[in-house]
Image (cartoon, rainbow, N blue to C red):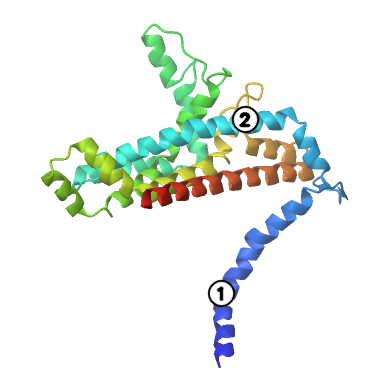
């Protein structure tokens, strides 16, 4: 009877397991196999072993795309985390005004990447953009944000931060609303200042939320693609080509599916390693504080 119940329980999860295998497990395994072959969109291909990975090690374009991706991640994640936390602290109060402002700050998150890039191309364009017109009115020369190698990554970072602000803000708001109010009342009775209350009560209580936001945003920004493709096309001279844009150009521009799959596997391992390192470091820090 117990065995029958176990099999009936398995039947309930079987549809999910089937879809999960088709949508995630099979593509993952198929990608690993493709990375070991030289294959294009139309040919059957042939096995080359680790040849694609050896090519990646000596490919300066792939190396530059990885470096650009890391730079963008470092530009985006810390600023986005601090800004989202600051806004959440400011809006963590009852009232219609705070609710309206929450909706305004979250509104950018529901836009598609196409709309976001159109908005920011209009803002950043030096000839007829909003910033260009404002700087010309002030007597300054407009900056070519999208065509200068030293400005294009900060421009993409600003665009991404504006677009991605909504979800981290809501996560921090949810974490703030879970903190017991009696802790703040006790701090007020002890005459603790705002900074002391923030560092001793609010921030420790938000530790898990903070880790979640940083891990989610790090994984997301290491896969940044649409902004670079639609705003700059990877230019100028590859200064804004990201790792995923490299995959796209290799697979659908040069039709080298095996080579693109190898690059995708490398990026997957990097994201996995970064995420596990963050999780491990956070766990060590939490364990050290608990001692």
The residue tagged with tag 1: helix, strand or loop?
Answer: helix
The residue furthest right is 46
Please indicate whether residue 51 sits to the left or right of residue 290 in the image: right
User: Which x, y percent locates residue 263?
Assistant: 71, 41
User: Which x, y percent locates residue 35?
Assistant: 77, 48
Residue identifier under label 2:
67
Please indicate whether residue 132 sits to the left or right of residue 22 in the image: left
Image quarter of residue 245: top right
Q: Residue at x 63, y 69 (%)?
A: 18
Please indicate whether residue 188 sits to the left or right of residue 140 in the image: left
Q: Residue at x 76, y 34 (%)?
A: 57
Residue 13 is labelled as 1
- Near-viewer residue (107 or 30): 30
Of circles 1 and 2, which is in front? Answer: 2
User: Which x, y percent locates residue 276?
Assistant: 55, 49
The residue furthest top is 139
Mark closest to the chain's N terminus, 1 or 2: 1
Quadrant the N terminus occupies: bottom right
- Near-viewer residue (236 or 128): 236
The residue tagged with tag 2: helix, strand or loop?
Answer: helix
Image quarter of residue 30: bottom right
The residue furthest front is 291
Label 1, label 2: how far apart the Cα atoms are: 42 Å
Residue 240 is labelled as none
Q: Is residue 251 above or below residue 6?
A: above
Would residue 100 be visible to someone looking at this image? no
Would residue 176 be visible to someone looking at this image? yes
- Near-viewer residue (188 or 93): 188
């Amino acid at each position: 009877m117990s065995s029958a119940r176990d099999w009936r329980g398995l039947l309930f999860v079987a549809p999910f397991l089937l879809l999960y295998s088709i949508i995630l497990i099979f593509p993952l395994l198929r990608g690993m196999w493709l990375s070991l072959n030289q294959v294009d969109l139309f040919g059957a291909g042939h096995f080359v072993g680790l040849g694609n990975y050896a090519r990646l090690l000596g490919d300066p374009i792939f190396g530059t795309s990885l470096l650009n991706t890391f730079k963008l991640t470092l530009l985006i994640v810390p600023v986005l985390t601090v800004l989202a936390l600051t806004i959440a602290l400011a809006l963590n109060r009852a009232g219609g005004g705070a609710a309206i402002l929450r909706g305004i700050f979250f509104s950018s998150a529901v836009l598609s990447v196409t709309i976001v890039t159109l908005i920011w191309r209009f803002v950043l364009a030096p000839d007829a953009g909003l910033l260009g017109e404002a700087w010309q009115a002030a007597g300054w020369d407009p900056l070519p944000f999208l065509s200068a190698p030293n400005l294009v990554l900060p421009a993409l970072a600003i665009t991404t931060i504006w677009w991605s602000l909504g979800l981290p803000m809501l996560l921090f708001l949810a974490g703030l609303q879970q903190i017991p109010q009696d802790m703040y009342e006790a701090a007020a009775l002890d005459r603790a200042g705002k900074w002391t209350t923030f560092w001793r009560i609010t921030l420790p209580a938000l530790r898990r939320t903070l880790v979640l936001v940083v891990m989610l945003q790090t994984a997301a920004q290491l896969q940044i693609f649409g902004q670079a493709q639609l705003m700059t096309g990877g230019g100028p001279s590859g200064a804004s080509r990201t790792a995923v844009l490299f995959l796209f150009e290799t697979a659908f521009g040069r039709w080298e599916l095996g080579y693109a799959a190898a690059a995708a596997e490398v990026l997957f391992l990097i994201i996995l390693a970064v995420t596990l390192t963050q999780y491990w470091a956070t766990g060590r820090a939490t364990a050290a504080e608990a001692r």
